[in-house]
Structure formats: C-alpha cells, structure tokens
Amino acid sequence: MMKKLRDERSSGGDIAVMKSEIHKMEMRLLHLRRIQEKLIHDMEFCVARRDIILDKVMSKFKKDPKGQHNQKVIFCKRLADQKLKIKQIAKDTKKMENRIFEQECQIKDTLDKCNELQTALKMMEDVIPNVDQKIMQMEAIKYHNLQALVFKQRKAKMLQDIKSNRYKILFTSEAAISEEFQNEQILHDYLKHVMERTSQDFPLLKNNIQKIFLTLEIL
C-alpha cells in the first residue's frame, strides 16, 4: 500500500500522467479551434468575394450588352469555383467540429478518471496512518513477548545454576533480599520517570522509548 501511494505521488504515477495528457489534449483542442476559426473566416471571405464578383458582372452586363454571353460563361465558371471552395470549406469545418467534440469528450473522460484516482488516493492517505499505527502496535507486542521470553529463559537458567551450586547467593537473609528489592524498585521507578521525561522532550523517539517501557514492565 505504501509503495502504491508513493507511485501515485511520483511524476510517473497515474495521476501525474493523466494531468500531463489532459494538458496536451487541451493544447490540441485549442489548436483545432483556431483551425476552425480560420476555416469559418475563409468561408466568409469566399462568400463575400462571390457577392463582389456577382455585383461586378451584373454591372458589366448593363454596360456592355454585346459581351453578355462571354461574360456570363466566365461568371458561371468563377461562381462554380467559389461554390466548390465554399462547399469544401464547409466540409472541412464540419470535420473540425467533430474532432473538437471528440477531443472534448476525451478530456472529460480523462478528467473523470483523474478525479477517481485522486479520490482513491485521498482514501488511502486517510487509511495509512491507522495501518502504520497498527503495525507499530504489533511490533511493540512482538518485542514485548520476545523480551519476556528472554527474561524467563534467563530466570530458568539462574534457578538451574542455584540448584547446581554454580551460582553464589549474594543475599542470604530475607531482610537483605527485601532491601535489595526496594532498591531495585526505586531504580525501576527512576528509570521510568526518566523515560517519561525523555518521551516528552523527544516525541520523535516515541517508538524506541515505548520498547524501553515494555522492557521495564517485564522486570
């Protein structure tokens, strides 16, 4: 889970890639719209030019009735050319509109996927602290159990040494044992107090200090 989160945050993560693709598609969309504007402008220019040609021809017809036939042929040819050009521009404009629509749909789909990934990432970020906390708790329990096992093994060995007369008893009387126990308890409480103060002064060492607390509980 942690690795996946790091991958999502990195420049090669899905979200970063999608944002890059969205930017590229937006730039292509802007380019297509500029082409569309130029095509519309060219079509408007052709229509205006056709009207100008028509006005000029009609004026010449009125001034030179004898040349009407030749002028009419030329006029029809130019008019046909203009119609073809306008038709082609209209066709190209329609294609451009379709491409723009497809590009807009693609951008929308990519944005939706990006939003879904961001939502999933947010959910992961909310869950990870709890997972980390559980992992630390499990590690602390594991450490506590290990220390308890080691302590029991040492205690068992010491008892075996006593039975085998390999261990010299330092405190032979009950009073001496009680006094030593009190001294150990004072030292234990002092160590616990020191670690509590250390935990307050150095919160970043919380996990390591917790292990020491667990060890003190065993003793």
Image (cartoon, rainbow, N blue to C red):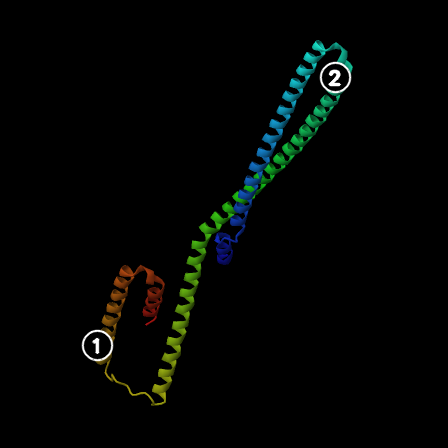
Badge 1 density bin: few <14, some 14–19, many ≥20, Cα 10 Å: few
SS of the residue at dot 1?
A: helix
Quarter of the figure with the C terminus: bottom left
Closer to the eye: label 1 or 2: 2
Q: Which of marks 1 and 2 is nearer the N terminus?
A: 2
Q: Which of 183 and 90 is in front in this view?
A: 90
- Is residue 146 shown above or below 119? below
Three-letter amino acid code at disc 2? Gln
Residue 179's disc is 1
Query: Residue 204 location, x and y as percent?
Result: 33, 60
Residue most extreme to the bottom:
165
Three-letter amino acid code at disc 1? Glu
How far apart marks 1 and 2 lie (CA) works out to 132 Å
Q: Which residue is drawn at 43% across and 54% down?
A: 129
Judging by the rendered image, the residue that carries numbered circle 2 is: 71
Q: Which residue is drawn at 23% across and 83% down?
A: 173
SS of the residue at dot 2?
A: helix
As drawn, is 86 to the left or to the right of 143? Answer: right
Q: Residue at x 23, y 73 (%)?
A: 182
Location of residue 196 by image quarter: bottom left
Q: Which of 164 and 145 is in front in this view?
A: 145
Q: Which of 173 and 8 is in front in this view?
A: 8
Residue 32's disc is none
Q: Residue at x 63, y 37 (%)?
A: 102
As drawn, is 63 to the left or to the right of 216? Answer: right
Badge 2 density bin: few <14, some 14–19, many ≥20, Cα 10 Å: some
- Is residue 104 shown above or below 183? above
- Is residue 18 shown above or below 141? above
Query: Residue 150 location, x and y as percent?
Result: 39, 76
Query: Residue 183 location, x and y as percent?
Result: 22, 74
As drawn, is 174 to the left or to the right of 214? Answer: left
